[in-house]
Amino acid sequence: MPNEFNLFPPLPWSFLFLQDLIGTIVFAISGAMAARQHKMDIFGLFILAFVTGVGGGTLRDVMIGSTPVFWIKQPIYVLMITLAVILTAVLKHNIDKKGWQKGLLFFDAIGLGVFTVIGVQKGLDFGVHPLIAIALGGVTGCFGGLIRDILRNEVPIILQREIYVTASLIGGAIFVLFYYAGVESRWVDIVTISSVIFIRLLAIRFNLNLPRI
Amino acid sequence: MPNEFNLFPPLPWSFLFLQDLIGTIVFAISGAMAARQHKMDIFGLFILAFVTGVGGGTLRDVMIGSTPVFWIKQPIYVLMITLAVILTAVLKHNIDKKGWQKGLLFFDAIGLGVFTVIGVQKGLDFGVHPLIAIALGGVTGCFGGLIRDILRNEVPIILQREIYVTASLIGGAIFVLFYYAGVESRWVDIVTISSVIFIRLLAIRFNLNLPRI
Amino acid sequence: MPNEFNLFPPLPWSFLFLQDLIGTIVFAISGAMAARQHKMDIFGLFILAFVTGVGGGTLRDVMIGSTPVFWIKQPIYVLMITLAVILTAVLKHNIDKKGWQKGLLFFDAIGLGVFTVIGVQKGLDFGVHPLIAIALGGVTGCFGGLIRDILRNEVPIILQREIYVTASLIGGAIFVLFYYAGVESRWVDIVTISSVIFIRLLAIRFNLNLPRI
């Protein structure tokens, strides 16, 4: 006898969940767009969108032992990624336009901020050391794009450019400081996400980079 | 005092286990053959055979939280991979022959079918959503070859060619449909594996590809 | 209310723990040095140091189900890696000197020996088959460098050169033999680590390689 299952499991609506979905979609689109440069077919594109959208959170969950990982428990993520892939395929002729790329960078900054917050929060919920929570925020925010670039066979762009990991780690540090200062959870989230977005946009706008070593 | 252990733990013989072993061997051979193009020594070859043979299943087990992962619990897999490596090293002079390569593509198709079935089944056993079970079938079937190509420093071939991921996902969908239609387990397996093999061989024979995006 | 945490959790001092720290630092330095060739900024450098230093042990812990993984439970590892990164950045002008590189190869051999021992021991503690324990020693010792090279977008050097995986697996086999022969734990460690270091230094000194397949 097959297991029962809920075809449409209830969604855990919250401010952060909504942003998590947006972050997943945006990261998935960036993965799908990257795939287009490699003459992949629709499923190759899907896989790149998939690893970019859920790769960071999957790694985090696996390392702290929160299994099954989040997207296995809640099918909405795979659905969102499918949507992102279709969107990218449909919009492919408009995709080189500058406005679209600017928009993507903006949404990507939101994704980075949200994923950082979710990673740090999940780490603290598991009772880890604040320093490690910041690291988990970085893993959640940055490793999706890292895995995407590994699959594309390129040196991960986030290791080379424009204060990306930096923005996530600074955001994580801000989160931890406000959290232990007793600031209300919602405000900790908002301040952290805003900081990450602000740092990223500043870095992109003025083409800021840390000095190479 | 050292832990006791069973030097030859009993094998869980079944139709599917037998095919699982065949799938592991065939994927391991494909990994070992790929290594030969990179001037690796015998242990480099072994590692590529290893990750190709068990990489997909390992990722699946880790993500659903079925740890220790399957090949840690049952040493037969490492033994089979060792066998595959020796076989490849011994047969290296015959390996360029067309017949051998055709044979490998055929066995690889079997491996893909079997691994897809095992992945979907294990997902359903863990009570995941059918959509996610299909994804886990794809991970099990496709990610071993993906990791192999990452280690070889190439864009994974399965993202680019000949309806590979596609065959696995269609197979997974067939499995789920038949499973929830109440078809007997053995027949679900046979129909799914046959479908995957059929789609793959058709794609290879007629050099079918999905359109690039 | 935030979780309580211990800002400086007590360290589990032991001979092996001390070596583990040294191994982590040395591997982290090798990761940071590798990053320098790719014009990464300080955080790119940190991430390469990080994955090289803890990558192998993380993979081992995740696959046997020992989660949260070791560096999440004990922040000293991230601190040691930060130290290694600062050290590498500060010493960058001296780093090309031959003496330094020789020293690094020597310490890397120590790291490989220690990580092999820790991997095999942890496997046996989890009650796995000795053959699998040897494999876990190899994963712990070798996969940090493997992930480092994947991120650098190169074919992993350990698959190609100078009896690296081989040294780890031979060390693992020696460990298992002595362990089941009832030799005292400390001596098992010392003999294994010495063997790995000896094999590695011999291979480097005489430029030994296994035959390519």
Image (spheres, coloured by chain):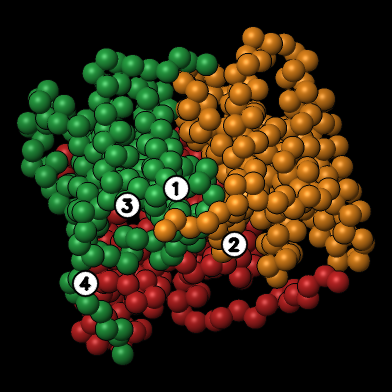
Chain colours: A orange, B green, C red
- Residue A55's image quarter? top right
Query: Are dots 1 and 4 in contact, CB under 8 Å?
Result: no
Up-down relation of residue A14 to residue B204 (above or below):
below
Residue beneath disc 2: A66
Residue beneath disc 4: B9
- Residue type at mark 2: give it: Ser
- Residue type at mark 3: give it: Ser
Residue at 39%, 75% (x, y): give it. Answer: C126
The residue carrying pointer 2 sits among few (fewer than 14), some (14 to 19) or many (20 or more) residues within 10 Å by Cα, namely some
Query: Are dots 2 and 4 in contact, CB under 8 Å?
Result: no
Location of the C terminus of chain A (image quadrant): top right
Residue beneath disc 3: B185
Residues at discs 1 and 2 both on one chain: no
Question: Which chain does the residue under circle 3 lie in?
Answer: B
Residue at 69%, 62% (x, y): give it. Answer: A123
In front: B129, or C94? Answer: B129
Q: Look at the numbered disc 3 and give the secondary structure of its residue.
A: helix
